[in-house]
């Protein structure tokens, strides 16, 4: 073997481990940043986004008064129907999540103009804030049902443990009682009872509610207005009026947030369209037929 070939082999043996190590370092660095990016995306969705409410692919339990029609917001569902009573007047419950907000006053005004009562699932974000703090009582003073939607609305902390959920529940219940004098018993889970965020079985949180004499409701009519993007008013109107006839008892999911101006814009036409069909609009109570994504 020539001296030059021997020298080349020696150089290869010297530099090969260095090259392999450098390649491995580059690969690890790329993987690190890729994993961190994925984690940030997941955190963004799971903690502070409304996206969980836009894709509801869980099984539903609809208590007596429901119908066998396919729910428009789910991909795979099991509906346990009650007896459909032809003579029974259809009932619709308009519900507003996430308030109070700068839009609460507009919503209350529209409801009053149409002599309609609704249900507001409030959180604690408005507590102590000028222009919002007094809206808890305004909701009750106008004859609407005020209900619990968690205090923090932070999915990560809320669903991290039963103890965290209980602490949050105590805070929102106390806030409503202190602001309005109402002993609230109606609850809606942020993201719904079939959310994909909680790592714990949602039944554990349902047990907490039931132990205190509370109950939770989800929805069966959803016009798609919980996403971060703005939904046109006509799409919201169609999303409700085109599906409402499928049910004897319908709970409509809407949102009371500063960003949902088109929801407020759509509200008069939604109410008028329902009233024209001789549908009864009612606030929720403990007697409202259960509509739950995950029955417990």
Image (cartoon, rainbow, N blue to C red):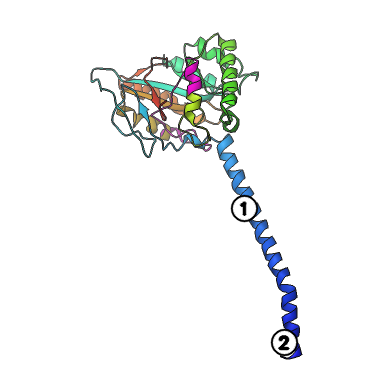
Which quadrant of the rendered structure holds the C terminus? top left
Magenta residues span 207-234
Asked whether 233 or 120 is in front, the reply is 120
User: Based on the displayed image, in which of its 4 quarters is residue 23 positioned?
Assistant: bottom right
Q: Report how far apart the C-alphas of labels 1 and 2 lie in the structure.
A: 42 Å
Q: Is residue 110 visible?
A: no
The reply, left or right, for residue 238 in relation to residue 213 is: left
Asked whether 263 or 6 is in front, the reply is 6
Residue at the bottom extreme of this rendering = 2
User: Based on the displayed image, in which of its 4 quarters is residue 16 positioned?
Assistant: bottom right
Disc marking residue 5 = 2
Disc marking residue 34 = 1
The reply, left or right, for residue 234 in relation to residue 169 is: left
**In terms of sequence position, does the residue under pointer 1 or pointer 2 come before the other?**
2
Asked whether 117 or 73 is in front, the reply is 73
| Residue positioned 64% across, 48% down in the render | 36
Image coordinates of residue 241 in percent, x first then y, are 35, 29
């Amino acid at each position: 073997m020539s001296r030059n070939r021997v020298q080349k082999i020696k150089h290869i043996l010297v530099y090969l481990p260095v090259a392999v190590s450098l390649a491995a370092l580059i690969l690890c660095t790329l993987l690190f940043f890729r994993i961190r990016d994925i984690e940030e995306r997941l955190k963004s969705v799971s903690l502070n986004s409304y996206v969980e409410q836009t894709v509801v692919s869980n099984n539903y339990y609809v208590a007596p008064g429901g119908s066998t029609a396919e729910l428009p917001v789910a991909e795979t569902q099991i509906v346990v129907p009650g007896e459909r009573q032809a003579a029974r007047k259809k009932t619709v419950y308009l519900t507003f999540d996430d308030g109070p907000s700068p839009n609460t006053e507009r919503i209350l005004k529209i409801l009053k103009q149409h002599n309609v009562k609704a249900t507001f699932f409030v959180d604690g974000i408005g507590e102590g804030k000028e222009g919002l703090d007094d809206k808890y009582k305004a909701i009750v003073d106008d004859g609407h049902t005020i209900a619990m939607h968690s205090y923090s609305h932070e999915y990560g902390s809320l669903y991290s443990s039963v103890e965290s959920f209980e602490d949050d529940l105590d805070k929102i219940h106390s806030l409503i009682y202190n602001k309005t004098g109402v002993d609230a018993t109606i609850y809606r889970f942020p993201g719904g009872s079939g959310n994909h965020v909680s790592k714990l079985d949602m039944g554990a949180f349902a047990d907490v509610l039931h132990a205190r004499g509370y109950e939770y409701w989800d929805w069966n009519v959803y016009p798609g207005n919980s996403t971060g993007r703005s939904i046109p008013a006509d799409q919201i109107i169609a999303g409700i009026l085109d599906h409402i006839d499928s049910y004897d008892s319908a709970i409509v999911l809407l949102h009371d947030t500063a960003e949902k101006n088109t929801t407020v814009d759509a509200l008069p036409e939604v109410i008028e369209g329902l009233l024209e069909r001789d549908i009864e609009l009612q606030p929720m109570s403990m007697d409202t037929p259960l509509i739950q994504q995950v029955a417990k």
